[in-house]
Amino acid sequence: MGMVNPCALVSSCHLMKTVSRTWVNGRCLTYQQALPTQPVPTLQHTCERYLILLEPFVEVDELKRTKQLVQEFLKPGGVGEKLQKGLERKAHNTDNWVSLTTDYLDNRLPVVAYSNNSGSFPRMDFRDEEGQISEALPADYLGGKPLCMKQYSQMLSSCRIPGLETDSVVFHGKTSYPSRCITLAYNSQFFMLEVYNSDGSPLTVHQLCVQLERICSSSLETSTEPVGILTSLNRDSWSKCYDRLIQDKTNKEALSAIQRSICVVCLDKAMPQVPDDMYTRCNVLQMMHGGGSQWNSANRWFDKSLQFIIGEDGAFGNNVSHSCLDGTIGMALTDYVLASIKKLEIMESSTVPLPTPQKLHFNITADIKKAIEEAKRSIDKIVQDLDFSILSFNHYGKNFLKANKMSPDAFIQMAIQLAYYRVHRQHCASYEAASMRLFRQGRVGEIPSTSSASVAFVMAFNDPNKKNTEKVDLLRKAIEVHKWNTNMEISGQTVFGHFLGLQHQATEKNIPMPDIFTDASFDKVFDYRLATSQVPSKSGCLPCAGPYQYKTYDICYTLLKDDMTFVVSAFKTNTENNSEELKKAVEDALLDMRTIL
């Protein structure tokens, strides 16, 4: 590969409601301790809502049987009360009992596609190698209430660590000696690039260009084993490799350096050229998985909390570890970074010589080399299987929906419900991601999207004998139910989270799992086939996530005043799902629903 001119960049230069941002210099955690802890809902309230959620999925006889199981679970002095008291004790002794029961770190599937999410940024204004390189945080509020900012303090200098059965996350940003380096990935090799001068000031743009040129000119060697691709393995396989790697001192030091670094910046080689109308989809895929072992999938460290990706051809985006931070936090950082690029200034550089960036070395044994080959096959299979379809809908946006006195987000959820039914001729368990940051260390909740009201609307809408007035009335009722479910979730009245916490209590205390959780009807509500999230962006960044399990669709969407964008993902080998077909159905549903307003 030829010499890269870093300085050319300078000259060419899942309800996720929108939150307001107030600039608070260095005080993003000002309100942290004043935030309430997430409450444990009452057992009675959660069980009553569970039975309501069941109604669209079960027949009368099955619902009757489940009600009997619920009554047994609620008996005074019974197992439900015992588990509830244990959960309440845990909640009293922890900042957030829900965050302790989520399965981000227990999932053994690869983080690529199944867990990490990414953002596809607007294409940069360069098309070749030469252009490739070149503590004030916003305090967030929702409805006038401050939101938890903990994730902001944890998104840099953090990393997921593989383990057998469950992983862990290390946060190095608040240690006594935080890293002064970023990890630079180039040509599937890794370098430590110090980004601060000896006086503590950050390197200027010119200084960074000089250092990046040094790295690119020193990493032409291609015979090095692509260690980074190991992070794309399923977690158990990667954990075993990791344990073998750290037995060697050189490997252990290299791994520690990556984990402690501020973030990873990936300088990718150009992907195969595609027509302009296919570019956005291809860029999304590049940000999600790198394109495969022959392209940029080894030029990654997928365990790192934050990776910025810049391609020779102008591709630009990020890859974010969901175990460390949520999509809206990553998007807020993205908006900040893209706004900062527009204000970029070239400043006078210090004449003090810069230290040479340090290349990380790994000692690769035969068994690790074999694992690398396995990882190549694994990532290539994911690349072939993962499919994205993108809908840019410019017929109307939230202004039109507000003019019709409808909640824009709930309206979109009903359109998705209608689209899914038209494709699959059945209703499915589905949820919309909700930010739980009104509570200390809150992460993501799950708003149930499928309700008796949504089913009634969908069935009526597809009935030619129903009048438009009746369809609109049912739509408004379905929207109100979804708004109510949203308010329940973000206020801490979570059904799925509560049941998950109770299940964890049973496991921890070696109590046989209660029948209510092993009953067939339980999966009909919580075995989701459709995961959705609204991820607001001010910068034109496209949020994207893969299905969290093989049989699921994922839909990320952004909603603006006069348009909206949807990113639909599914796995091709699951022949029941088709991302392109569902995308088209969403478009048709939005157009058809407009006609009745």
Image (cartoon, rainbow, N blue to C red):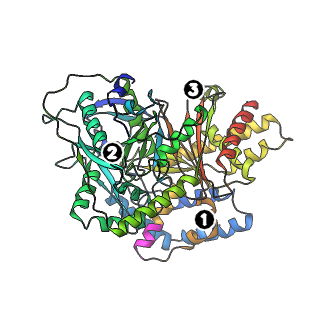
Residues at badges 3 and 1 in contact (C-beta under 8 Å)?
Answer: no
Q: Is residue 506 magenta?
A: yes
Do residues under tags 1 and 2 come within 8 Å of each other at their CB atoms?
Answer: no
Residue depth check, mark 3 versus mark 1: number of the one nearer the observer: 3
Q: Which residue is mark 3?
A: 561
Can you tell which of label 1 and label 2 is closer to the viewer? 2
Question: Label 1, on which residue?
Answer: 522
Cβ–Cβ under 8 Å for marks 3 and 2: no
Mark 1, Cα crowd under 10 Å, few <14 / some 14-19 / many 20+, is some
| Residue at image mark 2 | 220
Distance of mark 3 from mark 2, alpha carbons? 47 Å
Q: Which mark is residue 412?
A: none
Whether residue 453 sits left or right of residue 313 in the image: it is right
The secondary structure that dominates the magenta segment is helix
Q: Which x, y percent locates residue 189?
A: 33, 49
Percent x, y of residue 5: 33, 30
- Name the spot of residue 390 as percent of width and height, x first: 60, 39
Q: Report the amino acid beneath label 1.
A: Phe
Tag 1 or tag 3, which sits nearer the N-term?
1
Helix, strand or loop under label 3: loop
Residue type, numbered disc 3:
Lys
The quadrant of the image that shows the C terminus is top right
**Residue numbers of the magenta segment:** 503-510
